């Protein structure tokens, strides 16, 4: 398994640092070029994660490198949804997922996506994703407002608290439909004061949230077996 979002986020953050910082459409074209290039890269899986102990795996709901079968039963889905509702303070507090802005696969990233990418870098244009280490325990160190979705199975996790960088990147899977998962994160972001944008691009749903210099970005897709796969990246400052 490759943690694709780190391979995606690192060059985006570097390019955001070099783009001059005004978030106009021209910057968006450059950001899109970086995104497309990064999507074709491979990031070698750290052997320490593949051989992580069962104690560490328990933090994320997985075992060793053998990817577990995701429980897609109605019982499991409803239990996860119920827990998610409790985490936002009840069903009345669960926001509807914002309607997605549809972008062509080769379209420029939106200004909000560019801003989110910039927020993933450290002060002084530091590329925080060069500093990450891989461990299942990083999935338990996500910002409080953006935990793993209830009953989600972490596939891979990485992060860094090196210097001014406080970044997390986690890939997890769940049997809950992606619309419900994204609505949960949109609600959590809105409740925490983040500005949220939802985009559909290249066959993936992209949810970005910005609060000053802190950011959360999610790439969501449905994979065979009616399983939702989520790449979740956060930067907290």
Image: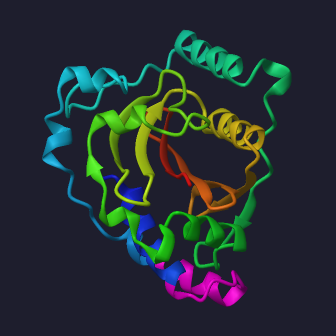
Q: Residue at left 75%, top 55%?
A: 100
- Between 35 and 148, the residue placed more toward the observer is 148
Q: Quadrant of the C terminus?
A: bottom right
Where 231 sits versus 7, above or below?
Answer: above
Where 71 sits versus 52, above or below?
Answer: above
Is residue 93 highlighted in magenta?
no
Q: Position of residue 120 (x, y in %)?
A: 51, 63
Q: Residue at left 66%, top 14%?
A: 82
Over which residues does the magenta segment extend?
Answer: 18-36
The reply to whether residue 205 is visible in this rendering is: no
Q: Choose top left, top right, bottom left or bottom right for residue 38.
A: bottom left
Q: Choose top left, top right, bottom left or bottom right for residue 67.
A: top left
Q: Residue at left 71%, top 74%?
A: 111
Q: In this rendering, would 233 be left or right of 208?
A: left
Q: In this rendering, would 192 be left or right of 33?
A: right
Where 161 sits versus 34, above or below?
Answer: above
Q: Position of residue 229 (x, y in %)?
A: 47, 41
Is residue 23 highlighted in magenta?
yes
Where 34 sits versus 177, above or below?
Answer: below
Q: In this rendering, would 139 be left or right of 113?
A: left
Q: Position of residue 140 (x, y in %)?
A: 41, 31
Q: Position of residue 196 (x, y in %)?
A: 74, 53
């Amino acid at each position: 398994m490759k943690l694709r979002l780190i391979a995606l986020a690192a060059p985006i953050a570097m390019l955001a640092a070099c783009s001059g910082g005004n978030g106009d459409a021209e910057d968006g074209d450059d950001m899109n070029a970086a995104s497309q290039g990064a999507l074709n890269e491979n990031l070698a899986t750290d052997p320490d994660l593949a051989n992580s102990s069962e104690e560490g795996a328990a933090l994320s709901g997985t075992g060793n490198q053998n990817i577990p079968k995701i429980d897609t039963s109605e019982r499991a889905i409803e239990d996860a949804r119920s827990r998610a509702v409790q985490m936002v303070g009840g069903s009345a507090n669960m926001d509807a997922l914002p309607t997605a802005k549809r972008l062509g696969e080769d379209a420029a990233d939106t200004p909000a996506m560019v801003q989110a990418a910039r927020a993933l870098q450290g002060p002084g244009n530091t590329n925080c994703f060069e500093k990450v280490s891989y461990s299942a325990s990083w999935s338990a160190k996500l910002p409080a407002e953006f935990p793993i979705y209830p009953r989600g199975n972490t596939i891979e996790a990485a992060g860094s608290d090196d210097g001014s960088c406080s970044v997390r990147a986690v890939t997890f899977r769940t049997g809950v439909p992606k619309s419900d998962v994204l609505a949960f994160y949109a609600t959590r972001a809105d409740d925490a004061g983040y500005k949220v944008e939802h985009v559909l691009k290249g066959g993936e749903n992209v949810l970005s949230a910005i609060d000053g210099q802190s950011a959360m970005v999610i790439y969501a897709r449905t994979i065979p077996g009616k399983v939702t796969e989520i790449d979740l990246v956060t930067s907290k400052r």
